[in-house]
Structure formats: C-alpha cells, structure tokens
Image (cartoon, grey):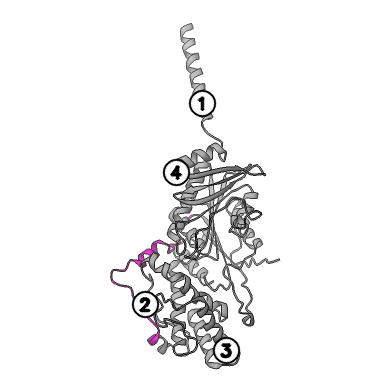
Amino acid sequence: MNRHRILVGISATLALSAVLAACGTTPVPGSEDSIRNAASASGVTALSIVRRDDGGLNVTGKLSGNAFAARIPASWNGYSVLEAHGYQFPTESEVVPSPTGPATNPLGDPSFGLLSAAYAQGYAAANTAYAKTGYAVKEGVAANKALHDFLEKVGSKKQYITGLSMGGNITVALTEKYPNDFVGALPYCGVVAGWRAEQRYLFDFRMVYDFYTRGTPYTLPGNGDAATVNAALTLSVVQSAVVKLFTAAGGGDRAAQAIIGQVASVAGAPGDVVSFITPLASTVYGLADYLATAGGTGYSNVGKTYRGSFDDVALNAGVQRLALAANDTSSAYLEAHYTPTGKFTARMLSFHNTSDPLVPYSFEPEFRGIVAAAGNSANLVQQTVQAKAVDNTAASGPAHCYFSQKEVVGAWNDLRNWVENGVKPTDGKDITNKS
C-alpha cells in the first residue's frame, strides 16, 4: 500500500513538473522571447529588438529579403494592424520601414498617422517593403502575407489590413485570397476595382487624348502608339503640352475648349489641368515597368464603343485599338494581381476622394457592383472625402489621396468599432475633416 502511494506521488510530481516545464517554454505573446521564436520559425534575418521609451518594442528585420518594421505596445491587446504601402516609382528604391514613427522619422508612418494611432490604442503596428518598386501588387501581397504570419507566431490573435492607392488593391487581394487572416480591411484612395481597371483608365485616357490632339500644338510624342515606351515623352513635355492646351482654352480658344470637354467626357475625367497631366504622366514613369512586369498591356479596347463626344462615330473609327495576342499572358497576370471577386469575410471600409486624378472615384461604385454580384454587400461600407479644389490659374486641382490625419484615423476608428463592437459605419457618409 505504501509502495503504491509512493508511486502515485512520484507520478503526480512528474506530471506537475512537466506542466511547469511546458509553461516555462511558452513565452508571453509580444515578449522578446516570443519575437525571437517567431523570427526563427519565419526565417527572419537581421533581427533587431529595441525597447522603446514607452515600454513597447521596436522590431525590425527582413522577411524573405524584404525589410519590415513593427511596434508592439507594452500593454498589447493581441491585435495587429498592417499597412500596405502604395506605388513607388520604378526608378526609386523601396523605402526601408522604420518603427520609430513620424516624430523621429517621417518615413516611419506612411499611413497618415494610422499606424501611430493604432499603436497608441494598444495594437501592434507593422509595415513592410516589397521585392520590387513600380507595379508590385504580387510582391506586396506576398510581403504582407509573410508579415501577417510572423505576427501570428508572435502571438497576434486578430489582424487588420490597411492600404492606400496600390496598397488598396493589395488590401482587397489579401482579404479575398486569405479570408481567415484578417478581421477588418481599410483601403483608401485604393485601386479597389482592380489593376485591370486602373490600366483601362490610363490607356483609355491616353488614347482618347491622342485622338483629339492629333495634328494640334498639344499632341504628345508617340501619338497613336500608347503602348510603346517613347524616350521623347518626358514629364516636362507632358506638362508643357497640357498647360498650353488649358492656357489656350482659358484665352477663349474654342478648339482647345472642345478638346478638353470631349477628352473629359469620354475618358470620365474632370476637366482640369492636374486631372489631365496625372494620367498622361503615368506613361512617362510607369509604362516600361508595367509592360515588363505584366508581360504586355493586359488590356484590350478592341470592340469597345466610346461615348460622350460630339461625334462618337468618328471617335470610334479613329481611336487607337489595343489588341491582345493569341498567346497573351498579361491579361491573366492582371487577373491574378489583382482583379477582385467581391468575395471576402472581413469587414471592409473603403473611402475615396470624390475626385482623384490617378485612381478615379468611379472605381468605388464599380467595386460596389462586384461585391453586390458576389452577394457580399453586408461586409462593405464606402465613404467619401471631398476633393481638393480646382484652380486652373495655379495649375492646381484634385490630388491623389488628398486626406488629413483626422479623416484617416477617424475611418480606422470606425472600422475597429464595427469589427469589435458591431457598430456599422454609415454607408455613403462624407467624412471630410480638414480642421
């Protein structure tokens, strides 16, 4: 009997020791040990963990070769917020993210203060560089997915994804491709209708502009060949031609006025200097990279009927037509990187300027239609911010992503209140707040 009790006692002691040992090897989520373990499991290189003055941790390193940064609060709520950055010129290098925030490094928070606000509220805040600049939706999805998985290993229970411009397309792609990864999504001034829609807008604008300026003082080098890189087409050439056009129109030149009116009507663009220069300039800095990345134009207007001009018959007979080759792969590339399906389970709040010269506001109703067709309208709220005022005398007009910190952080607060408390934001609300 005594021997039996001794054996039972030994067994109980061993079991308790095993439990205590197991507890001892499981680090607290968000602690330095949890970060090191996650880094080891994720293949992070150049890991750095620095204690912040507020007791939180600054974490930097490289995931699959991409530099990333994260701020983890001392009193972490277990949630994380990721920011997918927008388009960077192909001639530039990827900006190395910094966790120090805008107080010491303006590049530390590329999100209009959203990441800093979320960190102050108890969320881990993180962002990452991509494997390339320019058109980098594929690379942005991969980099942010890797960052999500790393933070999950650190102990993140739920995660949000946010992103502006191209980052908005990446945000939509992530929520659709990985429906279990994110509880909330905040694309702003985003290419939410898809990268094919973006190329459709840019190519159509150039081809319609070419048609109406052919043989005029406002024509551009490469007129009639919008899909070929032309070294003579520079930013200064674009600016000079468009400013000359608007100057003539402002002086009463009816031919110039007619050109502006018809290009704006057919292309679906505002009739101001900035809204003309911006899409045309994209050819200067982005066309070569886009064609090389996608493997072609990815967009065809063969069979498309343009409307809204004084003479639609003449326009459709004379506008340049882009055809895709039989063995084209670029269209499939745009489909994969990324054309939305409207199928996502996260709560998504999207907001946009009512006029945007690069990513038009029309993408919002187009995206709404895609989501509705997927039977998913309950998960989408869309809101607006008033555009920057037009002043043609100063060559000023609508700006891309013309937001204040109050507008962006306010939208973030509405999103998290929807996700965490069930309070759905007002659809269609004007959230302009520049005070």
Q: CA distance from mark 3 to mark 2?
A: 30 Å
Residue under numbered circle 1: 21
Q: CA distance from mark 4 to mark 3?
A: 59 Å
Which residue type does callout 4 highlight?
Gly
Closer to the N terminus: mark 4 or mark 3? 4
Kindly indicate whether the residue at mark 4 contacts the one at mark 2 (C-beta within 8 angstroms).
no
69 or 421, nearer to the observer: 69
Crowd band around label 2 with a 10 angstrom C-alpha radius: few (<14), some (14–19), many (20+): some
Magenta-drawn segment: 316-345
Residue 93: x and y in percent read: 49, 60
399 or 369, nearer to the observer: 399
Which residue type does callout 1 highlight?
Ala
Residue 227: x and y in percent read: 39, 75
Q: CA distance from mark 3 to mark 1?
A: 80 Å
Residue under numbered circle 3: 249
| Whether residue 57 is situated above or below residue 206 in the rendered picture | above
Residue under numbered circle 2: 322
Q: Secondary structure at mark 2?
A: loop
Answer with the quarter of the image where residue 97 lies. bottom right
